[in-house]
Amino acid sequence: MGVKGNTMRTFFILSFVANLALTLISLDILPYCVAVHFGPGAVPNGWGSKYVSALFFLVIQTVLFFSMYYSSRMIFTFPARWMNLPNKDYWLKDENKPRAGEIISKLMWQFGTALFLFLFIVNLLTIQANLSRPVRLDERAFIIALVMFFIFIGYWLISFVRSFRVPGEKVA
């Protein structure tokens, strides 16, 4: 996998752990009843217990973490007809699956790191909103974070497709 792959895996794990830590810290600093959803104008329109909210975040983040961490194993588990991969006839040959698995791991750890960083910012903004009076989300900061995440998704999708070109094949 190489040093770069191990570094990406480390960032992925650290971003996940940072989210878990922030969620657990939020239990100590937030009031019992918190805004869990914000509507137009960043005004809260959904409320709930901080414990239910934290549990929801912990479960979702854990499921995301494990599904991304082990995503490369799907090419060894599921039939090729269930896979949607560029040039899958080449990459899903038995001799190419290990390399495809490495590429998928690296890309999913990269995507997961960005996703967990985005979720970290959203969680920080939600905590900040719930500690302010009146409760209101910093909509500008949220939109900036969301746009940056969408830009990353565009970059990542291009990288994904480019990573699964057939080696030695000319690009048109």
Image: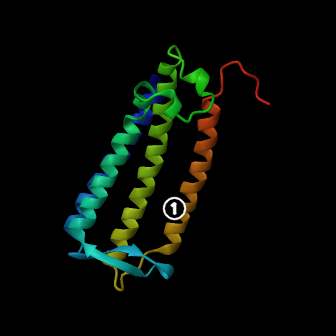
Q: In this view, does 167 lie to the left or right of 60?
A: right
Image height of 138 relative to 57, above or below: below
Image height of 35 relative to 160, above or below: below
Q: How many numbered marks, from 0 up?
A: 1
Quadrant location of the N terminus? top left
Query: Image point 52% across, 31% down: which residue?
Result: 81
Query: Image point 63% across, 36% down: which residue?
Result: 161
Specify the farthest residue to the bottom. Answer: 134
Position of residue 95 measured from the top left corner of the image (x, y, whole percent): 52, 13
Position of residue 106 measured from the top left corner of the image (x, y, whole percent): 48, 33
Specify the farthest residue to the right. Answer: 172
Q: In this view, does 25 lie to the left or right of 67?
A: left
Quadrant location of the C terminus? top right
Q: Is mark 1 on a helix, strand or loop?
A: helix
**Quadrant position of residue 53:** bottom left
Position of residue 88 measured from the top left corner of the image (x, y, whole percent): 59, 27
Position of residue 101 measured from the top left corner of the image (x, y, whole percent): 47, 26
Query: Image point 35% across, 44% down: which residue?
Result: 65
Residue assigned mark 1: 145
The residue carrying pointer 1 sits among few (fewer than 14), some (14 to 19) or many (20 or more) residues within 10 Å by Cα, namely: some
Tag 1: amino acid: Ala
Query: Image point 57% across, 50% down: which residue?
Result: 152
**Which colouring convention does the figure follow?**
rainbow
